[in-house]
Structures are given as structure tokens and as C-alpha cells.
Amino acid sequence: MKLILLGAPGAGKGTQAEIISKELNIPTISTGDMIREALKSGTEMGLKAKSYMESGALVPDEVVIGIVKDRIALDDCKNGFILDGFPRTIPQAEALDSMGVDIDLVLDIEVKDEVIVKRMSGRRVCEKCGKTYHTESKPSKIEGVCDVCTGALIQRKDDQIETVKTRLETYHKETEPLKDYYDAQGKLKIVVGKDTIEATKELVMAALK
Ligand code: AMP
């Protein structure tokens, strides 16, 4: 299955992508994670993306389109994949279409902005392995320490409140029009995100059937 997860930053796409990836045994392609990785390794692309990302703006289309094109050409994508955080603009969706990628389903996880702001301010990420946590809904066993690799848990710059607000504005302006784009292709399903990961998972799994 080739699946796109749509939704505002903080709507829970990443967590649901992890779950679906295990259930269906297909990889998740998160452009946000890939850009952060490039930034950490100090590649040219990472350096280019840094200022956009930290201010809550989108990285230029041609940069992310290039990343995704290379990634989906790899062997582990031949039985399908989950796109988490891509496409985020109409030109990105058009680029995907023109690559000949036949998307089966676009799942939009809808969560109100005020809920997102609350959620994101509690988000923590392991600086070593990248695993994500939440101070309330998905805490680590020991506060501030990653369960998996004992790395330190930090708050990403782009999860800080002012940046979150900018990211939400960017989402409404640039990404939300993709709902109509995929609805017109008959591929859109909407799931209203619930308070718990488990409850949202039930709805997501039902939508995949
Ligand atoms: P995420 O972790 O998916 O919320 O992505 C974090 C940041 O990476 C975003 O705020 C953007 O700056 C950048 N980014 C990730 N995916 C894309 C994309 N498809 N298009 C443009 N920028 C992106």
C-alpha cells in the first residue's frame, strides 16, 4: 500500500505512521526526520534547510522532492510505503504524480489547533536516536532519558510555542489545500484524531480496510 498521511504538525501522524508501518510491514518516509538527519550530519542540504526549518517555514519544494524521489526508489519501498509529512504543498503533490507514484490512500488526521499547541509544547525527542515522547501522553520511563538508548530528551526548536504557531499558519495556507487536491482524485479519507494514540489508531486501522 502506498499511503500519504496528511494533517497539521502535531496531529499525531508520526506516531500513527510508526504503528501502521509495523502492522503492514512497509517503511515510513518522514521528510522531517530525513531533513533533521541531514542537518545533524552537516550535509549541504541540511545546512540549506536549517533556517527554514527552525523558523517554522517549509523547506523549498525542489529540495524535498529530490529527497523523496531518491528514497522511494530504494528496494524496501517496492511493496509500498507511508509518506509522513510529504507532500506539503500542491507542487509537491504534482511532482509525486508526475513521478508516476500511484497513491492508494490519503489519510488526513484532523486535530484542532489549540489541542496541537498543547501537544507540541510537551513533545520531547531523543537527541541520540530520534525517538519521540510526550511529557503527558507518552512519557519516557525515566524523565528526560530515552527508554531505547538512554540518550537525553530535548525539545526541538521547531516545537517551541512561537514556531508551532508559525508552523500551523504554514499548514493552513500551504498544506490544507491538498485535502481538496486528493479528494478530487477520490483518495481522501478523514480521521478525527482522538485524545489517545490507541483511540486514534482504531480509527486509522478501520480507514485502511
Ligand atoms: P515535520 O517533522 O514533518 O513536522 O517537519 C519539520 C520541518 O521540516 C517542517 O517544519 C519543514 O521546515 C521541514 N519539512 C518537512 N517536510 C517538508 C516538506 N514536505 N516540504 C517542506 N518542508 C518540509
Image: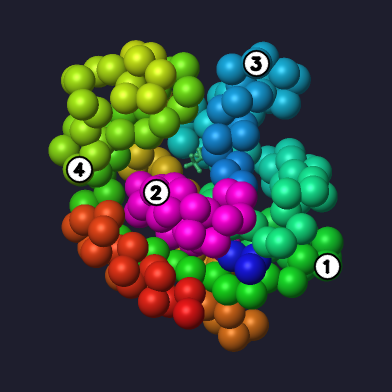
Near mark 3 (Cα within 10 A), the count class, few <14, some 14-19 or many ≥20, is: few
Mark 3 lies on a secondary structure that is helix
Count of all numbered marks drawn on residues in the image: 4
> Would you name the residue on which mark 4 appears?
137
Label 2 close to label 3 by CB (< 8 Å): no
Q: Residue at x 61, y 50 (%)?
A: 27
Q: Nearer the viewer, mark 4 or mark 3?
A: 4
Mark 2 Cα shell of 10 Å, populated few (<14), some (14-19), many (≥20): some
Q: Is residue 67 left or right of residue 58?
A: right
Tell which circle, 3 or 1, labels the residue nearer the N-terminal end: 3
Q: Earlier in the sequence, mark 2 or mark 3?
A: 2
* Closer to viewer: mark 1 or mark 4: 4
Are there few (<14), some (14-19), or many (20+) residues within 10 Å of tag 1?
A: few
Indicate left or right for 123 with 171 as reference.
left
The picture places residue 102, in percent across and down from the top left corner, at 74, 71
Label 1 sits on residue? 100
Mark 4 closeness class: few <14, some 14–19, many ≥20 residues within 10 Å? few
Provide the residue designation for mark 2. Answer: 15
Segment tinted magenta in the rendering:
4-28
- What residue is disc 3 on? 41
- Asked whether residue 201 is in view, the answer is yes
